[in-house]
């Protein structure tokens, strides 16, 4: 009886996965129709041919980042320690997506950072900084770079933040996320072609999540650009704790089961009225509460 192999899932496309087993790449599938495997998962494998295997089990995860809508959830990555949200001076970024990403990171116990790319567009820089100020005021670190005009500075800024971390880069299309990944992982394009061939997704398909090694113990996961980040899976209690600016006021409301929406003598609503909590963040909180009540799966 052969000993089970252990590997790390480095790419996912539909129900097809690629695992790295001590430098060897194996095409993997799950048993039956289950697709609860994420990039970054540590898995136990059973070989079915020379370069193919079945995923027998998934090791316990440290963290799991995922999106969900009313009907289903979409796993983004497992065992992450750090999340980088890439925004840019242009095109304009969506505060809704940034805030949802930060809430998801808080709920999952993942350290969140912001990257402002395209700082060379100087006329739009003050406005972008002003908008990001809402998040830096909450304690989220900001790193300013220009992948296009000062790649050396971008690498010098970001590389130390990636060492010994399992990181993911997320952001809307057009923010320069892929440009940054290509700077940080010089062989990224080659890796994409190899993974595409192994997953049989076509030479030009880059719409899969994939993991690259960084240095000795670091890794970076690139996810496809997306415009929406559903958080239907977060409960009421998880949501109020995932908005970091609510924390000083939790427990200060008149009612112990306060939802911080319309209740009298609510400490959170008082903080919103006094400008201590950004109104758009509280509005999003209400929206997320509404979404969590709609879950059908």
Image: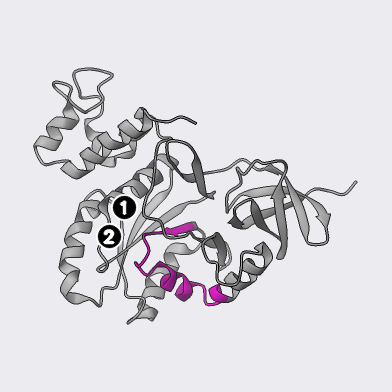
Residue drawn at 64 percent across, 71 percent down: 194
Residue furthest out toward the right: 1
N-terminal-most mark, 2 or 1 = 2
* Viewer-proximal residue among 236 and 194: 194
Number of numbered discs: 2
Label 2: element kind: loop
Foreground of the two, 17 or 162:
17
Q: Residue at x 9, y 37 (%)?
A: 274
| Left/right of residue 258 with respect to residue 104 in the rendered view | left
Residue 176 belongs to the span the image colors magenta: yes
Along the horizontal axis of the image, is 2 left or right of 238? right
- Horizontal and vertical percent position of residue 143: 31, 65
Magenta segment, which residues?
167-189
**Residue 222, placed above or below residue 66:** below
* Mark 1, residue position: 98
Name the quadrant containing residue 173. Answer: bottom left
Decide: few, some or many residues near mark 1? Use Cα within 10 Å; few <14, some 14-19, many ≥20. Answer: many
Please give the residue where the numbered disc 2 appears in the rendered image.
93
The residue lying toward the viewer, choosing from 276 and 160, is 276
Taking the image as shown, residue 26 lies to the left or right of residue 271, namely: right
Query: Badges 2 and 1: C-beta atoms under 8 Å apart?
Result: yes
Identify the residue at horizontal 14%, vertical 35% (top origin).
271
The answer for how far apart the CA atoms under marks 2 and 1 are is: 8 Å
Residue 254: image x %, image y %?
18, 18
Q: Residue drawn 19% across and 44% down?
A: 280
Give the x, y percent position of residue 48: 82, 53
């Amino acid at each position: 009886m052969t000993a089970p192999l252990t590997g790390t899932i480095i790419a996912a496309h539909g129900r097809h996965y690629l695992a790295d087993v001590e430098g060897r790449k194996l095409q993997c599938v799950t048993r039956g129709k289950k697709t609860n495997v994420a990039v970054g998962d540590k898995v136990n494998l059973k070989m079915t041919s020379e370069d193919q295997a079945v995923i027998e089990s998934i090791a316990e995860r440290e963290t799991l980042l995922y999106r969900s809508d009313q009907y289903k959830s979409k796993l983004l990555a497992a065992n992450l320690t750090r999340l980088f949200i890439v925004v840019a001076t242009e095109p304009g970024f969506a505060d809704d997506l940034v805030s949802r990403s930060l809430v998801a990171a808080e709920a999952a116990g993942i350290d969140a950072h912001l990257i402002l790319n395209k700082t060379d567009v100087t006329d739009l820089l003050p406005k972008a900084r002003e908008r990001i100020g809402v998040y830096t005021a909450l304690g989220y670190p900001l790193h300013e770079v220009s992948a296009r005009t000062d790649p050396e500075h971008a690498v010098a800024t970001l590389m130390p933040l990636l060492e010994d971390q399992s990181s993911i880069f997320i952001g809307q299309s057009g923010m320069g996320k892929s440009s940054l990944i290509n700077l940080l992982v010089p062989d990224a394009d080659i890796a994409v072609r190899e993974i595409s061939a192994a997953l049989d997704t076509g030479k030009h398909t880059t719409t899969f999540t994939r993991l690259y090694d960084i240095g000795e113990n670091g890794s970076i996961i690139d996810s496809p650009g997306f415009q929406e980040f559903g958080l239907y899976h977060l409960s009421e209690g998880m949501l109020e704790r995932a908005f970091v600016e609510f924390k000083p006021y939790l427990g200060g409301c008149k009612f112990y089961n306060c939802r911080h929406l319309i209740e009298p003598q609510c400490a959170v609503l008082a903080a919103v009225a006094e400008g201590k909590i950004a109104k758009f963040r509280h509005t999003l909180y209400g929206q997320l509460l509404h979404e969590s009540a709609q879950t059908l799966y």
